Image: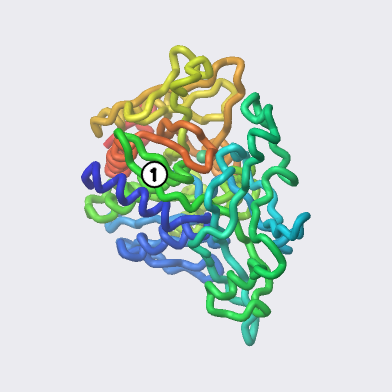
Amino acid sequence: MMYKQVSEELLSLIQQSPSCFHAVRTISALLEEAGYTQLNECDSWKLEKGGKYYTTRNGSSVIAFAIGEELDDYHFQLTSSHSDSPTFKVKERAELKGKGGYLQLNTEGYGGMLCATWMDRPLSVAGRVTLRTADGIEIKNVDLCDPVALIPNVAIHMNRNANDGASFNAAVDMLPLYALGEGEKVTLRARVAEALGVRDTDILTTDLFVYNTQRGIEWNGMISAPRLDDLQCVFASLCAFIESGKSGEASGAIPMFCLFDNEEVGSQTKQGAASTFLCDVLERISGAAGLSPAEHRRRIANSFLVSCDNAHAVHPNHTEYADRNHSVFMNRGIVIKYNANQRYTSDAVSAGIFRLVCEKANVPTQYYANRADMPGGSTLGNIANTQVSLNTVDIGLAQLAMHSSFETAGALDTYYLVNALSAFFGMKLCFAGNGKYRLG
Ligand code: ZN
């Protein structure tokens, strides 16, 4: 894929993925187009050599894998990324009556957003609903597309301290304005029903999130868009995964693309990285291959996970927040993340292997570590490892304003990650004994 095409397609994927449910639907469609067959976790699976499959959990997480034609001593080579981003969830009773007839959306925060960036932006609502049917329920995604709400700032004249460090109360300052008065009231539920072409009485309940309607842009070698954390890594790993399936050159490993929900709220859900989702799928693949539990564990021991989640680029106005020797920059390649307290999984072995993969792909790498007096964040790698322990490296792409409603990253870095992960999926990594590891 050409560099220019990469940015365009990334921005298109972001536009089509206003919520985690939409991200999964967009990705499922791309997998279907590339010949992957959906498996339902509730069915029994018949997996065949040469088959390409994916399964989803909760409509918000995905695991896809391809089984090669010649797989004798296979193991797994995986990527992980996350489908969710910080936002505001609309509560079940969606409207709040304010003074002066204002109608507001009744919301609560999801994840650790930068509140100021959500102000004065045209916001829409997307997510999923359950509908009443003749014999049960039906789950449907919905996107209102048009702006329907906005969180207004308080004018500087009324809050003279607004530029001196702000504090935001989620229950007071962050409620989106929805309508001006009772007379103009169209309930959010009625709008959702209209968008779906159903009666609002058919809607049983909802998982609806607010999103920034602003379209992503490319400018001066950078991209700015909502949800770059983590859709930039999602997009790059998906491209590399699908490309690896097209080439037909079996590396002898089973490539897997894993996308988890709920990273922004700690991953401890049935569809998060701390769930059994990955473990369950791995066991089902080995079960279909007739492997004993001990043999399955041997394959796991030889497997490798690249945990992909964006990293903090040095801030142009605040270079002091970065460690002096571990500052990372946009468009300078893939960031390998280290943390002594194991918030990141990278160690000398996994990082060494991944560096070599990048070298073979002609992709530059850079090293990230927090300033020693700053705790920083964590991500998927070590969380997934609590359920199924794999050799894992934590990597990402350098970006600014993480958890803003409009983030900025390097356009070239997406291309680098596609190339690095294509190389990763195209080679067989395995322990060769005596402290040696082979990249085939
Ligand atoms: Zn992230």
In the picture of the structure, the residue carrying the numbered disc 1 is: 77
Q: Residue at x 58, y 65 (%)?
A: 128
Looking at the image, the residue that sits furthest to the right is: 99
Q: Residue at x 36, y 54 (%)?
A: 12
Residue 325 placement (x, y as % from top left): 44, 13
Image side of residue 4 versus residue 41, left or right? left
Q: Is residue 105 above or below residue 382?
A: below
Image side of residue 81 versus residue 238, left or right? right
Q: Quadrant of residue 419?
A: top left
Residue 64 placement (x, y as % from top left): 42, 56
Query: As shown in the figure, which amino acid type bears the numbered disc 1?
Result: Gln
Looking at the image, the residue that sits furthest to the top is: 324
Asked if one can make out residue 428 in the rendered structure from this viewpoint, the answer is no
Q: Is residue 67 above or below residue 299?
A: below
Q: Residue at x 49, y 59 (%)?
A: 284
- Of 355 and 77, nearer the camera is 355
Crowd around label 1: few <14 · some 14–19 · many ≥20 (10 Å) = many
Q: Quadrant of residue 174?
A: top right
Looking at the image, the residue that sits furthest to the bottom is: 134
* Helix, strand or loop at mark 1: strand
- Of 361 and 392, nearer the camera is 361
